Image (tube, rainbow, N blue to C red):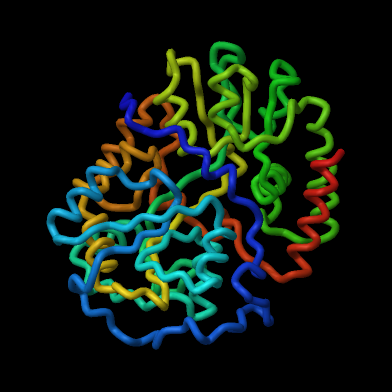
Amino acid sequence: MSHEARPLSRRSLLRSCAAGGLGLSLAGCGFVQQNTAMTADDDAPIDVKVDGDLVYFNWADYVDPSVFAGFQKEYGVNVVQSNFDSMQGMAAKLDAGNKYDIIFPSAKWAQLLASAGRLRRIDHTKLRNAELVFGSYPYFGDPWYDPRSAHTVPFTMYKTGIGWRRDKLGDLSGSWDDLWDPAASGTVFLLDDRDEVLGMAALKLGLDINTSSRHDLDRIAATIKSLRPHLRGFSSDDYDNLLNGNATMTQAWSGDMVSVLGQAKDPSIYGFETAKEGCPINSDCYAIPANAQHPGTAMLFIDYMLRPSNVIKNIRYIGYPMPVHGTEDAYAAIVKQLPNCVIEPGDLTTDRYFRNSSPAAQQARDATWTDVEAE
C-alpha cells in the first residue's frame, strides 16, 4: 500500500448545490443565463498552444507537485495556483470576475456553468490523449451534466459506501442495513451531507436518490430517524473518525478510505463496502472558463494530465481514480485491500448521480434534511 495519498477533507465541504451562487435560476428543465458579460462564443475553437502562464483554480493538494513541475518544464510556463474550499466559493470568485484558465467543477456545478455560458467548448479531437478517456469510459461521451462532454473532460471519480473497523465488527453483509448493526450502535456516523444521507435512505428503500416526492421524503425521513438512536453523529470527517477510534462504522467516500489506508498503523483492520441496493457515484471535471485568458495553455495542461504516466502519479498522490485507460491497474493496486473502491465503466450510470433540480424540489429536500438532522 502506497503511503503517498494525502488525507483529504475537501468532500466534507461539499453541500447541496445552490444555483443562486452563479446567478442562475431554473426555467423548466433548463437554465436561464443571467450574466452575459462572461459568456464566450461557445463555438469558437481554442488554438491549442502556449498562450501564457496557466492560472489554475482547484481544491488544494489535488495535483501531484511533480506533475506541475513536469508541465512547467516541458512547456516553459508557470502554473499560478489558487484554491477554493467549496463549489460555492469557486462560483463566487467566478461571479466576481476573477479569471482562471482551468477549473475543476463537480458534475452538478459543471451543468450549471455550461448552461449559463460560463465555459468554453472543448474540442476533444485536439487532445491527443482524449481517446484514453472516451474510448474506454463511454458514459462520459454524453453525460447528463454536459451533453457530449462539449465543455468538460472528466477528472476524478468516487463512490459512497460504508467504511468500518473489521477488528471491532467482523464482516458486514454488503447492505445499507449494516448501518443499523447493533454491534456498532453508538459508534456510527453518517456524512454531514444532505444528498448523501437522503440518498442512502432512498437506495435502501428502492427509491430515486434525487426524489423530492413528499411521500418518498416522508419514508426517507422515517428511515433515517430509525437510525438516530444508534448514531454518534453526522460528520464528513469520515477517515478521521475511523482513524481516531470515534467510529467503528461510517458512511464514507471511497477516496477518503484510501487516505485511511495511507495513514493507518494497521491498514488491515479497515474495510469498505458498497451496498447491494446501490451506491452513489460522482465525478469532477476539467473545464475552461469563458473568460480564460490562456485557454490554449489550459488545453495543453488537460492533455498533459491525461497522459497515463501523469495520471498514475496523480492517482497515487490523491487516492481518487481517474477515468483514463491504462491506469486502472495502478489504482487497483492502491486499493487491493478495499476492492469496492474500484470504479468500473459499468458503474457509471445517471441514476446514481446526485443531480440539480427545481427550487421547489431543493426546498423539499432541504426541509427533510433539516428535520432528520435536528431530530
Picture quarter with the C terminus? top right
Residue 316 in the image: state x and y as whole percent.
Answer: 31, 37
Residue 5 in the image: state x and y as whole percent.
Answer: 37, 33
Q: Tell me: 233 left or right of 66.
A: right
Q: Residue at x 41, y 62 (%)?
A: 103
- Is residue 208 positioned above or below 4 on the image? below
Q: Nearer the viewer, residue 284 or 69?
A: 69
Q: Tell me: 347 left or right of 367.
A: left
- Is residue 43 positioned above or below 101 on the image? below
Q: Tell me: 21 left or right of 123.
A: right
Q: Residue at x 62, y 20 (%)?
A: 248
Picture quarter with the N terminus? top left
Instruction: Kindly tell me whether residue 139 is visible in this rendering.
Output: no
Residue 157 in the image: state x and y as whole percent.
Answer: 43, 49
Q: Tell me: 312 left or right of 239.
A: left
Q: Nearer the viewer, residue 36 or 123?
A: 36
The answer to which image quadrant residue 230 occupies is top right
Q: Residue at x 73, y 45 (%)?
A: 205
User: How many marks are shown on the rendered structure?
Assistant: 0
Q: Residue at x 22, y 65 (%)?
A: 300
Residue 337 in the image: state x and y as whole percent.
Answer: 40, 24
- Is residue 296 positioned above or below 1 on the image? below
Instruction: Kindly tell me whether residue 330 is visible in this rendering.
Output: yes
